[in-house]
Amino acid sequence: MKRFQKNSLFTFAALLFLTPYGLAADAGQSAEQNKSAPLPIYASKTGKNGLFPEEMISMKEVRKAQERGQKLILLDARGKQSYDSLHISGAALPLTADYYQQEEHFRFGLVKSLPDRDKDLAVSMAKYPKDALLVTYCNDDCQASAVLLLQLKRLGFTKALAMTEGIQTWQAAGYSVVSADKF
């Protein structure tokens, strides 16, 4: 029951964020009209994590894009410790190294407050053009990639997508990952 309430609440919150920012503006376009779409989009009637189908992409489509040499930026929406222990090859963390260091200092009680995540995300993502293809991911059954996607959309990124599967499914499929024992 709690999981249902949590997912319903997230869906409601996501819709509140999406509507004011016009993020579904291209949803009414036909495939012919929307030829600028960089990748085939994963179609789902369920709207995983409260996202629209056009905001999601399957791991198979991400992998095909990588094999074609298509430029895309994979962003790991999990924390730094999770990223350090295992991440998709070529993926990056969305925040600056300074943010993660300050976050660690907070955990150890060395500073009294957390750094401003939204501000740091804006600073970190400033290096990418607004039309860069960004793909967020996290763990299986995790909503962090959807949250990061919404934050990227609010920053004005027009080609941000959330991968429907998580890193565990990616690894189980035999796709390339970097683990702590490979450092």
Image: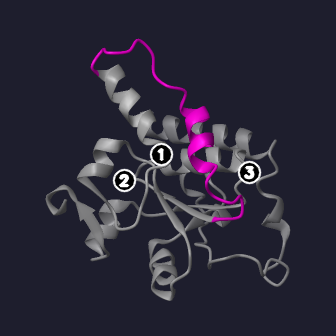
Residue 140: % across, % down = 37, 56
Q: Residues within 10 Å of mark 2 (few under 14, many from 20)?
A: some
Relative to 122, 69 lies left or right: left
Q: Is residue 1 visible?
A: no
Task: Work out whether 61 lies above or below 106.
Answer: below
Q: Which residue is mark 2?
A: 139
Indicate the quadrant containing the N terminus: top left, top right, bottom left or bottom right.
top left
Q: Which residue is mark 3?
A: 156
- Residue 112 counted in the magenta span: yes
Question: Residue at left 82%, top 84%?
Answer: 32
- Residue 72 counted in the magenta span: no
Residue type at numbered disc 3? Gly
Question: Residue at left 48%, top 40%?
Answer: 4
| Of pointers 2 and 3, the one earlier in the residue sequence | 2
Q: Residues within 10 Å of mark 3 (few under 14, many from 20)?
A: some
Residues at marks 2 and 1, CA–CA distance in whole angstroms? 8 Å
Q: Residue furthest bottom?
A: 68
Q: Which range of residues does the magenta coloring cover?
A: 108-132
Assign a secondary structure to mark 2.
loop
